[in-house]
Amino acid sequence: MPYLEETYDVIVVGGGHAGCEAALACARLGLETIMFTISVDSIALMPCNPNIGGSSKGHLVRELDALGGEMGKNIDKTFIQSKMLNESKGPAVHSLRAQADKQDYTREMRKTLENTDHLTIRQAEVSEIIVEDGKIQGVRTFSKAVYRSKAVVLATGTYLNARCIYGDVSNPTGPNGLQAAAHLTESLKANGIQMVRFKTGTPARVDRRSIDFSKMEEQTGDERVVPFSFSTDPESLQKDQVSCWLTYTNEKTHEIIRANLDRSPLFSGAIEGTGPRYCPSIEDKVVKFPDKERHQVFIEPEGLYTNEMYLGGMSSSLPEDVQHAMYKTVPGLEHVKIVRNAYAIEYDCINSRQLKATLEFKAIEGLFSGGQFNGSSGYEEAAVQGFMAGVNAAMKVMGREPYVLDRSQAYIGVLIDDLVTKENHEPYRMMTSRAEYRLLLRQDNADLRLRRIGHDIGLVSDEEYEKALKKEKDIESEVDRLEHTNIGAGKKVQEFLMNHGSTPLKTGATLAELVRRPELTYVMLTEIDQGFPYLPEDTAQQVNINIKYEGYIRRQKQQVAQFKKLEEKKLDVNFDYSKVHSLRKEAVQKLNLYKPMSIGQASRISGVSPADLSVLLVYLEQLRHGGGKESGDERRI
């Protein structure tokens, strides 16, 4: 019996945040791309929190935008509240976060996908990958149709063998009651891919009309909205915003939870998967932090055209009756009506150490993966992985060199490097503390760091690249002017300093020296600087940061230079480390397991000590100078 058979350049499996970015990247590079999704209506679905960005996640979105991704542009079109977090702290941890209109976000992303040339959207369940001689050949759907291609990107999210659980209720469904993908896991296992079981969760959605906001703290957006996308005109985003609300659990809430822990699938053993440490359920919080008298609960709107509200901070898998009881103990929720129950979701994903830094499987050429399928959590982490997997799938098909961002270039580089070099026993979440060079990798300078790479890939236009180059030149020029412009200790200057609580000058000083004072900023100098150029807001911000943190930035650049030396010492991913007899057994085991691409990457593998690295460096030198058993071999080890 004949079945449908078609051929594409790239196949993307999954229509979530990872799948959308992967499909758009490939199609925009001119490759005929097909994206499979369980439901076309669930493209770019937000099944959990109704927001994009947040601490460190905002960095990822801005980096993605600088490279040519879509998430930043899409949230700029569909946000209902925007806020820059951590503004009381240093610029390294400032991070943008925006509430989204969920339906609008999905609708806009779908519209973008449907109107992208070279991109086909197909509603079908992919049940098999087709592999021959260690190379991907395509996929087969549940209906037996065959789609052939030279590269496949798996971005299945939380759908593989998914089941949603609360209390003793267990439904074999994906998020929001959507159909799970019940067949692909067996095909992946049959092809030697190691699978693991993770879980995540979501809180209840409640009816806005049943909430008493007078008992809560109002959380408003920023007066001046900063865009996620460097292509968005900031003036187009200055609009009325909705409010979010803050309330707290209390001892009564915690008593109800403790009294019903035996009915929680999380503690009864009904849930097998490992959950995210940094986004725990409310029952997890109560158990792990018994001395804490209250926990924050953020009440967030799901959109402008719905009364559904999201109870951030109260994710749960407790039974339905317990959910009703505990939510009603929270101030403002005494008469709350639940629209959708909270639930945990278990799903299959991979052990990410099976991937190269390009997000290609080591054992199957042409097979890439991104998103929660790789063992990460969060929309933003998913999107950037999907983008990089899509880009490298496209490079594979086009015969071009792959793109790998290292830890000194981007948070994206930190995230992917952590996934492929560290043992991740729980869903991975990005945090600013994971980035060693976070003063250089700020969210505000993502365009200056990454526009060139996006342009090289082919996903950033000449116009956008030229804009970034001009911004860079303007910053350098203005910093130089401030460093070399002296200002006297005249009456106007002294009055300016006194008015701003700054020590008067005894002699002249450069304008840069004034900017370095903690109580002054670059923009304040408009009062005394006759040559002030009135640069765009984002450019002026860079001038201020570059001068104020010049010493710290210089020191971190020196650290990066040392890091680069180790990254440049390349290793052959096919090398057998048992040949290096001076290595410890654990190091041999871990190096053969992870197959690092460089000495730098090897240094970040748990179980590889500094002494092991010294042995490897000596071995490299011996090969380079013709020593050892592989005399004269100039190849990488």
Image (cartoon, rainbow, N blue to C red):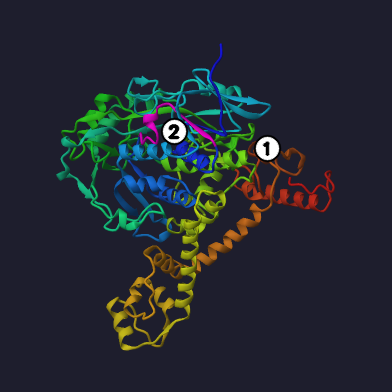
Position of residue 58 measured from the top left corner of the image (x, y, whole percent): 40, 50
In magenta stretch: residue 499: no
Numbered marks: total: 2
Give the mark nearer the N terminus: 1 vs 2: 2
Q: Is residue 437 visible?
A: no
Position of residue 55 measured from the top left corner of the image (x, y, whole percent): 39, 50
Q: Please tell me which residue is depicted at 27% across the width and 35% down the height of the picture.
A: 254
Amino acid tagged 2 = Gly
Q: Which of the numbered marks, if any, corresponds to residue 592? A: 1
Kind of element beneath mark 1: helix
- Relative side of 221 to 279, left or right: left
Position of residue 397 measured from the top left corner of the image (x, y, whole percent): 61, 38
In magenta stretch: residue 38: yes
Q: Please tell me which residue is depicted at 17% across the width and 38% down the height of the picture.
A: 211
For residue 631, above or below residue 375: below
For residue 206, above or below residue 636: above
Q: Which of the numbered marks, if any, corresponds to residue 502? A: none
Mark closer to the observer (1, 2): 2
For residue 166, above or below residue 247: above
Spatial separation of the CA atoms under disc 1 and disc 2: 34 Å
Where, quadrant-wise, is the C terminus in this rendering?
top right
Q: Quadrant of residue 297?
A: top left
Q: Please tell me which residue is depicted at 54% across the width and 56% down the height of the picture.
A: 452
Position of residue 466 measured from the top left corner of the image (x, y, whole percent): 49, 60
Q: Is residue 581 visible?
A: yes
The reply to whether the C-beta atoms of the residues labelled 1 and 2 are less than 8 Å apart is: no
- Relative side of 627 to 151, left or right: right
Where, quadrant-wise, is the N terminus in this rendering?
top right
Magenta range:
32-47
Q: Which of the numbered marks, if any, corresponds to residue 15? A: 2
